[in-house]
Image (cartoon, rainbow, N blue to C red):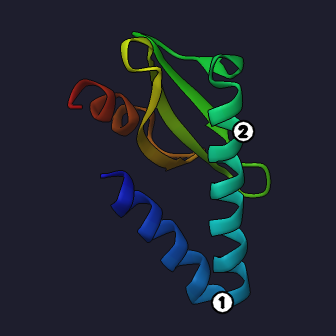
Amino acid sequence: MVRYDLADAIDYYTDISAKLGTRFESDFVETLNRLENTPQHYFNLENGFRRINLSEFPYMLLYKIEEEFSAVKVFGVFHQHSNPSFVKRRIRGR
């Protein structure tokens, strides 16, 4: 699902401008780097889920820290104005 979320967002911005699509992708990678370095620093939602916002674009990553694997699992890439019920369904349906 995350791949589709990301591809949809990149396609959206690329349709506007190839340069904008590239900037979105770079912002996404930068956000993953920040997340990797300080996963517990970002907003705690519910049931262990957290979110981190991209710096330049109105998107967020929904993730969970998996302590037993010393890893972070990303569950979605969402526009910040996404319907909250859609995001909650994604959390429940993981």
Element type at mark 1: helix
Element type at mark 2: helix
Residue under pointer 1: 18
Q: In the image, what residue type sits under mark 2?
A: Arg
Q: Quadrant of the C terminus?
A: top left
Q: Classify residue 64 by image quadrant.
A: top left
Please tell me which residue is depicted at 64% across the width and 16% down the height of the picture: 40
Please tell me which residue is depicted at 49% across the width and 79% down the height of the picture: 11
So how many labels did they put on this image? Answer: 2
Where is residue 14 shown, x and y percent of the image?
Answer: 59, 84
Q: Are marks 2 and 1 in contact (CB under 8 Å)?
A: no
Q: Is residue 52 above or below residue 80?
A: above
Q: Is 73 displayed left or right of 54 in the figure?
A: left
The numbered disc on residue 34 is 2
Separation (CA) of disc 2 from disc 1: 25 Å
Where is residue 87 shown, x and y percent of the image?
Answer: 39, 35
Indicate which disc, 2 or 1, sits on the residue closer to the N terminus: 1
Q: Is residue 53 above or below residue 30?
A: above
Where is residue 26 shown, x and y percent of the image?
Answer: 69, 66
Q: Nearer the viewer, residue 56 or 65?
A: 65
